Image (cartoon, grey):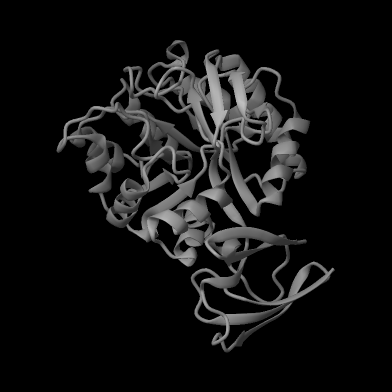
Amino acid sequence: MKHECICRIPGRTGAFKLIYEDGAIKLLKPVKADNMPDSNSNWLTAGLFDIQVNGMIGHYLSSDDLDTNKVLDIDRELEKRGILFWCPTICSQEPGIVAKNLEIISKVIEQKTARGIFGIHMEGHYISDLEGYRGVHSPKFIRDPVPEEFDYWQEAAGGNIRLFSLAPERKGAIKFIEKLRNQGVKVGLVHHAAKHDVVLEAVASGADLASHLINGCTPLIHRQHNVIWSQLSIDEMWASFIGDGHHIPYYTLRAAIKAKGIDKSILISDLFYLSGLPEGEYISESNKKKVVLKDEGLWIKGEDMLCGAAKTLDQDVEYVVKYCNFSIEDALIMASTNPARYFGIEDKMMIYPGRKGPLAIFLWKNDSLKGIKILK
């Protein structure tokens, strides 16, 4: 396959002539960008990187009926949208089912049949059980961190758990964070009601991400002393944000990203398994409640509470540019380069002659993002 175009690259100056042939970049040459404004440009990337995918197209990664084919289906669907890196996310569930699903995903990783999987993200097991802060996670699966349980899960995962999101105020959480970081596992803080001094202690122990910040806390919080301001104020903490327009209003999302800074912000989908299905009512596998899928959003029926997300990461990139007044370049950086930087694999995002595929080319035109080509 041969592909030629003039394109831009997120984080790089100017425009480039690209020739891609026989599975690699044959030419990448700077050209004048006079006739290629940012508002109507091809963008060449190594692919978007979604660090929180709970499932999609009816396949729930925490379900007791997960199999390798379903994981592969998700990988293919994400690839169609230019999402070439992702973290399967296992949520609160029976410990035995968690272990079984970790083994399934580990098998896929070892066989290299889903090239997009970077590593596994664990969320929901050791979070706050307070109403509001726990979100839609079932309280029967929420508990204090159990180091031996993590060892059991990591063995089942073949060492592929790369990120664990938890509440730092739970008993034993600080020591647990230290344990994970000493084993090379990143730690995010999520669904928690920790005071600022506890957040600081967690960060000192190795936690460095506020997972889906703004969400995962009670609707009513102190206007000054709360988990949002606390985590935004700590410069060394990264923050991930769900940019679907339902989880966070556009003006709040803009303010939060501006406070944290582009270079420490990561866009995620928090994609739920109902994403990609027709609009309607469903019974959620995660909590057995009725869920309404409408207008690319997911709500618990009869409640003002979201149940994960339906928009994919490419749609979130479009939303952040269109409504939050960020450039397409900054949005692509937050959805690709930044998650790679967070995990220390930024080299995988570098674009250069000889670079092999897959690569993703997006077209930004008329406030719309379209994945136009996956180069393999």
Residue occupying the far top of the picture: 140
The answer to which quarter of the image holds residue 354 is: bottom right
Against 130, residue 54 (above or below) is: below
In front of the other: 372 or 129: 372
Camera sees residue 20: no
In front of the other: 204 or 73: 73
In this picture, residue 270 sits left or right of residue 247:
right
Against 44, residue 290 (above or below) is: above
> Which quadrant of the rendered structure holds the N terminus?
bottom right
> Which quadrant of the rendered structure holds the C terminus?
bottom right
Residue occupying the far left of the picture: 224
Q: Which residue lies at the image location 54% right of the left edge and 87% below the top edge? A: 34
Against 278, residue 45 (above or below) is: below
Q: Provide residue 149's location: percent of width, then percent of height.
A: 50, 20
Q: Provide residue 84's location: percent of width, then percent of height.
A: 65, 52
Q: Which residue lies at the image location 52% right of the left edge and 82% below the top edge? A: 14
How many callouts does the rendering have?
A: 0
Q: Provide residue 312's location: percent of width, then percent of height.
A: 58, 44
Against 244, residue 132 (above or below) is: above
Q: Provide residue 142's location: percent of width, then percent of height.
A: 43, 16
Camera sees residue 292: yes
The answer to which quarter of the image holds residue 23 is: bottom right
Q: Which residue lies at the image location 62% right of the left edge and 50% below the top edge? A: 85
